[in-house]
Amino acid sequence: MKTLRNIFSKAIERSANLTVRTRLTILTILGLAAAMAIWGVIQLRALDEILVEQQVKRLYDLAETVSTYYQHFPTGRGLSALDEAMEDHVKTDIRLARIDLFSIINGELEYIVGAGRVPYEWPEKVISSAIEKSKTQRIEIDTDSGPALGLLYPFLSERESQIFVGVIVFSQTRLEILSRAKRLLLFSSVGLLIAILLMLAPSYRWLIGRPLKVIIETIDEFRKGKYVRRIPIARQDEWGQLSNHFNVMADEIEQVLARDRELHRHLEERVQEATHKVVQLQKQVTQLQQLTALGYLTASMAHDLGTPLHSIAGLSKLLLEHDTWPPDVARKLELIVQQTQRLNTVIQNVRHATRLPEPHFEAISVPDLLNETLPLVEPLMQKSGIQLMVNINENIPVLHIDRYRMQTALLNLIQNALEALPDGGKITITAAPVPQTQTVSIIVEDNGPGIPLELIERVFEPFFSTHTDEGLRGLGLAIVQDIVKIHGGRIEIKSRPDEGTHVILHFPVIDTTLSAEAAQDSSHSRNL
């Protein structure tokens, strides 16, 4: 177990050293290769079915001709002529391996006439199946001369005895066609993949490389104290939104610094008042400087996630256009599309760089919310060996919430619980109504080491984290707290050392009548 964990850790470290272009290329190759492989398997299976159907039709026609002849001429002379005709047919058609005409009387097989290039005895289970179902049976056969396809055609004679026509044809031609189709499909897929990669290289430089370079250079100069510098990108896409948010943040920082200097000039005259304002302004400056670092990281995040998300969403939508997927696979593909849309919304909003957009509230049941959210963390649970338990009260009312914000809050809490259980454990999610306060509580509980009492009051502070590794840390619970406040709720944490942690979210319940109407409208829209 430790060896696998070390290998996984080394793989993550190596991937972290790769450039975004390399990661994008790897993801593109893997995605396209998987899509082409699936498409190729489907095409080859369809081609094989067509070839088999053609062979079966030919065998069926031949068997029907033999049965019709036998029914009209069952005499000795007729059988002799039929035997000669069958031998001539086998000799003239090199693809034909064998034709047999036999009967089953009192459970015994009696050979009537036949001709063939290879010896073969029809299996009893095939004959029994044909008798039981009274239907034509086909079977794949391995003969001394190569693979073949057999057809067992049953019919009743005038004496009401069971008669069978068995026809066998070699499948070598079909296998050669499939082999050529495989080679052609392989070469065309490799060529298409190379063409796409050649198109991707200049697209990366134009869409991501140059805008990202301008943003990074501007942020680096801003960090050196050149607060008058702004990002000169006037696009209307995600880069333009990010640039606009950074420029607004830079204007606010410059205004705060100006007010700070003004307060220092009046410090001697109004010492007590100026001191208070300086403290407040210093807090704002510190927060905005932290947001500056966040803007730098956000640029990298948008770079890392933007293009792969579009690729994932596009490929998922293409796969959804096929109506042959099982329901669970189609549902997972829909979840992939939904979650790429949610992540794309998060990237575009850049929530920590500017004012958040207005929330979009809708009536959603707690089971539906968890059904959309929990499949996203299922792979992490399985990989970490963590057990997930879900307890939902049957009488829990519908909530009036923002779908994407609530998913973000739950994912952050589950991620914190996962980090608290590096060696495995159990996470429990409980949802139940609280009639006394007219609220609904959603509890995310883990059986990890817990949080020290002296740190519980600080866990909601932005950028406060006990982790020493590099990265954007300490924002998870702060984000959750903001989301809960937007919904008019509250959050509380109960934790003791070595006894785990309970994070409880309280949300107000909307009017029962309105909830029922909203639920009916939601159900009606889904049915449409």
Image (cartoon, helix red, strand yellow):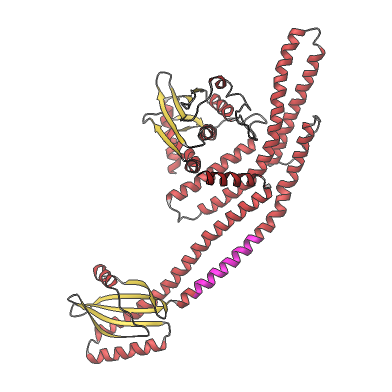
Q: Quadrant of the C terminus?
A: top left
Q: Is residue 384 above or below residue 324?
A: above
Q: Residue at x 64, y 49 (%)?
A: 23
Q: Is residue 254 left or right of residue 192?
A: right
Image: magenta residue range: 176-194
Residue 312 appears at what percent x and percent y? 58, 49
Residue 305 appears at what percent x and percent y? 63, 43
Residue 28 appears at what percent x and percent y? 62, 53
Q: Find out whether residue 142 is within the magenta segment.
A: no
Magenta span: predominant SS is: helix
Residue 526 appears at what percent x and percent y? 45, 41
State the image quarter where residue 270 is shown. top right
Q: Is residue 181 above or below residue 159?
A: above
Q: Residue at x 47, y 37 (%)?
A: 424
Q: Is residue 517 above or below residue 34?
A: above
Q: Is residue 465 above or below residue 49?
A: above
Residue 225 visible to an observer of this rendering: yes
